[in-house]
Image: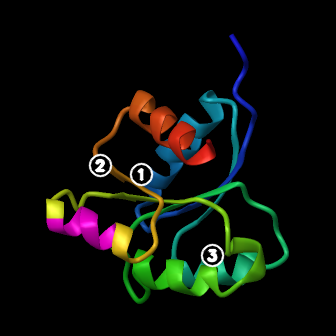
Amino acid sequence: MTEAISKHILVVDDDDDGRLLLCKMLERLGHTSEDFPSGEAALAGVAGKKFDIALLDIMMPNMNGYELLEQLRKMSEFQSIPVVMVTAKDKDSEILDGYKHGADYYITKPYTTKQLEFGLKIVSE
């Protein structure tokens, strides 16, 4: 069995507890992460940094996850990395909206470590 390659993952979620839990889950899966509490903080903090995957919440104040995704895609270092929307929005139409906005995968809250691991595997292939 081959070992999963460690990824450096951007995490953006305005819920402090949820963000911390997600980062801990990623760490247990062998990945590193850098997290931000808002879209604005992420945009200010990611310039020039290399990430393999981005995990973005959708429902955030001031700048939602879709708006953040749009801004990230304008940056050369984010034009081709996989983006996973991690959100409580779970209706079919909301999930389709995520894909229409350019998300590569969609994980609904609450989620398990196995679901997270599967989603990361899907976007890494």
Q: Decide: is 24 above or below 57.
A: above
Is there a contact, CB below 8 Å, between mark 2 and mark 3?
no
Please report the residue visible at 16 percent of the width from the left and 60 percent of the height from the top.
92
Horizontal relation, residue 32 to residue 37: left or right: right
Residue 85 appears in the figure: yes
| Quadrant location, the C terminus | top right
Residue 102 is tagged as: none
Amino acid identity at mark 2: Lys
Query: What secondary structure prevails in the magenta region?
Result: helix
**Residue named by callout 1:** 18
User: Dot 2 surroundings within 10 Å: few (below 14), some, or many (20 or more)?
Assistant: few
Q: Foreground mark, 2 or 1?
A: 2
Q: Amino acid at mark 3?
A: Ala
Residue that badge 3 annotates: 42
Residue assigned mark 2: 109
What is the secondary structure assignment of the residue under circle 1?
A: helix
State the residue at coordinates (76%, 80%): 76
In the image, the segment drawn in magenta is: 93-98
Please say if 57 is above or below 118: below
